[in-house]
Image: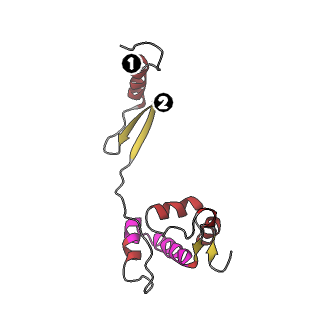
Amino acid sequence: MDGGRYGIAELAELGGVTRRTVRYYIQEGLLPTPLGVGRGKHYSSEHLERLLRLKSLQERGLTLEQIRREMAGPGRAEGKELTMRVAVPRSPWTRVEVLPGLEVHVSGRYRLPAPGRLEELVDWCQRHFRHVGEGDGE
């Protein structure tokens, strides 16, 4: 550690989270992107302070959306604006591999059928999908 200059592993350890969590918070716009580029990427003491505040709010039971609003509000350090990304709405999807190289993606708005019904789908796919060069199909 170099006087408020941290690598991702150090920031994660000091913040009590994993490196993956740090990356997720950056992706979600809860933490600013690292400073520098390439191998010179690093995080500052402001990143650490923000991560610790974020973790504290989460431990108080706030959702990530509530934390996002709280951290963007008037409690910000005076004159220090951090670059934030726009939050993109997300929806849960389930990926079902029915054959090697063939997947069905199901929106969270739908309930998956029972395993026996999925097996019927796999059987149907095996009959109707052919690898390139295995025949003309039906």
According to the picture, the residue beneath numbered tag 1 turns out to be 128
Q: Residue at x 45, y 68 (%)?
A: 30
Q: How far is the residue under mark 2 from the one under mark 1?
A: 14 Å
Magenta stretch, residue numbers: 46-68
Q: Is residue 87 above or below residue 106?
A: below
SS at mark 1?
Answer: helix
Q: Horizontal and vertical percent for residue 28?
A: 43, 62
Q: How is the image coloured?
A: secondary structure
Magenta stretch, main secondary structure class: helix
According to the picture, the residue beneath numbered tag 2 turns out to be 101
Q: Give the mark nearer the N terminus: 2 vs 1.
A: 2
Q: Quadrant of the C terminus?
A: top left
Q: Is residue 125 above or below residue 42?
A: above
Q: Residue at x 59, y 66 (%)?
A: 41
On screen, residue 114 versus residue 49, left or right, reads left
Q: Quadrant of the N terminus?
A: bottom right
Disc 1 residue type (three-letter): His
Foreground of the two, 135 or 127 = 135
Q: Horizontal and vertical percent for residue 122?
A: 43, 24
Whether residue 134 is in magenta: the answer is no
Q: Horizontal and vertical percent for residue 48?
A: 56, 75
Foreground of the two, 82 or 9 = 82
Whether residue 59 is in magenta: the answer is yes
Count of numbered labels shown in the rendering: 2
Disc 2 residue type (three-letter): Gly
Q: Residue at x 38, y 76 (%)?
A: 72
Foreground of the two, 110 or 7 = 7
